[in-house]
Amino acid sequence: MDNIRNVVIIGSGCAGHTAALYTARANLKPLVLEGHEPGGQLSLTTLVENFPGFPEGIQGPELIENMRKQASRFGAEYKHGHVTSVDLSANPFKVHVGHEVIHTRTLIVASGASARWLGLPHEQQLIGHGVSSCATCDGFFFSGKEITVIGGGDSAMEEAIFLSRFATKVTVIHRREHFRASKIMLDRAQKNEKIAFLLDTVVEDVNDIHKKEVTSLTLRNLKTGKVWDFPASAMFLGIGHIPNTKIFDGQLEMDQDGYLKTKDYVFTRVHGVYACGDVQDRRYRQAITAAGSGCMAALEVEKFLEE
Ligand code: NAP
């Protein structure tokens, strides 16, 4: 068989770029398949202030572009398009991108997790202008403002508690009266004087695209049917993430929510297939932890190929 790759990396977020950098520097000529959200979640955020090495912070898209340039400089190859299926039943593994089949001795899965959005008419246009799925990334910009968090799980409570450090008031908007959040997280949020709750309420839209900033949310109470405009400077989504793992169904082990199960950080149950970043991490989900696990996966690939 001609043209068997040493390593293919699925995904081009922090984990994928870091894996590419390390495997490129090991002279393995990695091929990175960029996926349907090139750059991953960092490309959707604004100023990143918690990635070490940038005392003034750095814009998310710039950080991710720098990572890509750095890996390219050492010979990493990037390819547009997303993987439609994989066959991990025998080595070399087969990776299908549309009609093309790529053969590879090792595979690094860094396909990430995508934030779940509400699907509101103007939600996508206001991402980065008051709509965010990452409190840790964007909370600081709303110091002294009144903001909202959507959801009733642990993520929503965690975001609300974190955001209360900056905002004057955080309103958690949840579609039911019962919460999915753990008792301890809910208690903490309920005891926080800056956090208020609006229950049995859904968001119908986020305004105002003409001003290019969030000024209010259109809300509807599910019990009374009342629709009203709720002033707020931001809408943070805490309604969960969806790991991008559909193509591995039946081939790699997953937990009940579809996150890839790994052993010793990055090992999947298939010899030669490693997973890193948010696709296997539902706990930390930080750019720096994703980069770290990308490095680990790359070092394991080197070892595997040497052996
Ligand atoms: P989750 O537990 O699935 O909760 C998602 C919440 O968003 C639910 O309250 C759900 O409402 C709501 N939601 C989902 N889709 C919605 C929609 N389209 N419109 C309105 N509301 C919607 O997700 P999560 O909070 O991200 O937590 C995921 C896992 O990570 C959990 O196991 C959690 O314990 C864990 N986690 C732990 C911590 C921590 O311990 N520090 C922090 C974060 C996450 P319904 O309740 O009505 O379905």
Image: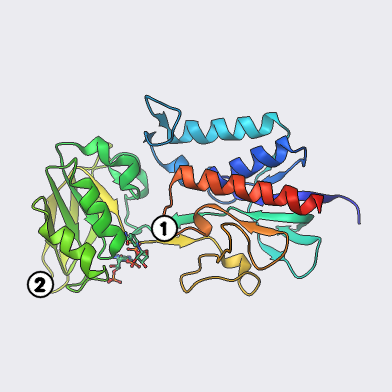
Residue drawn 37% across the image and 33% down it: 49
Q: Quadrant of the N terminus?
A: bottom right
Under 8 Å from ligand 1: the CB of mark 1? Answer: yes
Q: Left or right: 249 with respect to 155?
A: right
User: Horizontal and vertical percent for residue 130?
Assistant: 27, 42
Q: Is residue 296 above or below residue 24?
A: below
The residue labelled by disc 2 is: 224
Q: Which x, y percent locates residue 269?
A: 65, 68
State which mark lies toward you, 1 or 2: 1
Q: How is the image coloured?
A: rainbow
- Neighbour class for label 2 at 10 Å: few (<14), some, many (≥20)? few
Which residue is at 38% across, 29% downward? Answer: 57
Residue 57 in sight from this viewpoint? yes
Give the vertical position of 213 relative to 237 (above or below).
above
The residue tagged 1 is 283
Ligand 1 visible in quadrant? bottom left
Residue 186 lies left or right of residue 255; in this view the side is left
Badge 2 amino acid = Thr
Which residue type does callout 1 highlight?
A: Arg
